[in-house]
Image (cartoon, grey):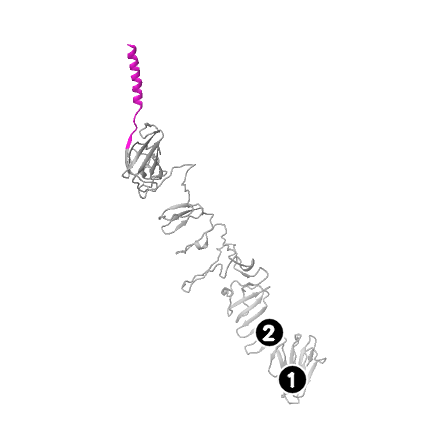
Amino acid sequence: MRPGLSKMKTGCSILYLICSSVMVAQSVHLSIPAVDASNNAVTIGMAYFTWGQFTGNDGITVQAGQLTRPVTNGMIDVTLPASDNAGYVYTLLFMHGSTADTFKWRVPAAGASTMAELNQPPVINNDSTSVHTNQANTYAAGKKQTFSASAITAGEAFAGVASDPSTATAGDRWFRTDLHHMRIYDGTTARSVMYQSDSLPANQLANPTAATSLLFAANPFNITYGNATGAGNMMSVVDTSGNTGTGYVFTAGTASGSSAKPFQVLAGGVKAIDVNSTGVVTLGTAGQDVSVVRSIFANNNVGAGNAFWFYHSNLLMYPRSAIGDTGNAYTFADNGGGNLRQIMASSLWIGTTTAGTRMAGFTSSGTATMAGLQTATAGKASNYTATSDDTSLPCNASAGNVVITLPAAPKTGEWKALKKVDSSSNTCTYSGNGKNIEGAATLVYSAQYQHAMAQYDGTQWWLY
């Protein structure tokens, strides 16, 4: 072989290899309306394209370069290699007048009819149910937006705004950097998404239209008010005149078997009202003020002829389980069973019903007696033994001599009025019954209208 021929063949082989390796990437012709960054149409201007080396969607390397195209009749006419999987490879500097806008383009193999379709990220395994970074929301209505799983970049990112958008539509959401809350527009009002750590003002609770229930675990539920109460009440639980229900306006109760106390009121930090676990209501601090009966009208403790009972022991009042005096309307008794006060259907006694030991009494006939201050009695025309209830002891001896015996155990300070009312010569004798009357065992009146007031000093009677 001739040397020259050998060189020619070798040169052709190298040239063929070079020619075969330089392949033209798939190009796409675009004729699209020109718009600025605010998506306003631009009639005239210049479009400057620059790009670095990239691999097109057909796997062929596209070398770096630049290209200039004018805007003619509001249209940009340009042919560029497709870059479906290469991301933003074209930088477009769009000059119109003194204004410059910059765009990042990706040219899909299928072409595009608007600049917005070119201003897209790379599409990898794209479908109509997914939205990718900076991709316009063009998927079909009702489709779900999904995000790729990532332990580092998972979730949504909101740059945040310092105020609510002025033209929000229903369903729009955004992050408020000043409030540190996510906001959602419901079509009328922008609502804040509350966090677990938020304190919700009471006036943000909507008026419930159905029964409302709050279920708490072991944690207490506390309501704390600020320092200023103003002229109104802090909290009121009231109904209206139109309430025709039969239930309670307010109930604080404990379950059967619970040892919790259902109710307590503090005044100035000191207990004012307390209801313990057995239902006993206490006023004031325990052991200091008054405890009242848990049920004043305790019908299960009422016997025949009795309405209700009170017990008294160190100012503690509670139901009595046994009724002692049939026919009494109301009985107040101490723990020992002795009546402190007994209001009867026919009479009333303070103390006991026994004459001489009661403190005060009112009989059905209208007679009133009180220790040391008794009521008047009728004149005695025959022998008579007085009681401590007798205040006046007039003597009528017109039918014969009369002896009136004073009480055997008079109370200190007890008074008796003594007087002979008739004009006969018969005598009225007042016997001290073991107690002297000014040093004598008896006092005898023989003349009409003789009289005296006698008072017992604990040892004998003195006349006044």
Residue 363 is left or right of residue 237, and the answer is: right
Coordinates of residue 346 in the picture (x, y in percent): 53, 75
Residue 227 is left or right of residue 241, and the answer is: right
Q: In this figure, which residue is indicated by the disc labeled 1? A: 419
In terms of secondary structure, what is the magenta stretch mainly?
helix
Which image quarter: residue 432? bottom right
From what the image shows, is residue 201 above or below residue 416? above
Coordinates of residue 334 in the picture (x, y in percent): 58, 66
From what the image shows, is residue 351 above or below residue 34? below
Q: Residue at x 29, y 12 (%)?
A: 6
Tell me where the magenta segment starts and ends, as one range.
Answer: 1-28
Coordinates of residue 289 in the picture (x, y in percent): 58, 62
SS for callout 2: strand
Which image quarter: residue 144? top left
From what the image shows, is residue 373 above or below residue 137? below
Coordinates of residue 10 in the picture (x, y in percent): 30, 15
Q: Which mark is residue 199?
A: none
Q: Which quadrant holds the C terminus?
A: bottom right
| Residue 19 can be seen, yes or no | yes
Give the residue at the far right of this rendering. 439
Q: In this figure, which residue is indicated by the disc labeled 2? A: 360
Judge whether residue 14 is colored magenta: yes
Which residue is more in the foreground, 186 or 249?
Answer: 186
Q: Residue at x 28, y 10 (%)?
A: 2
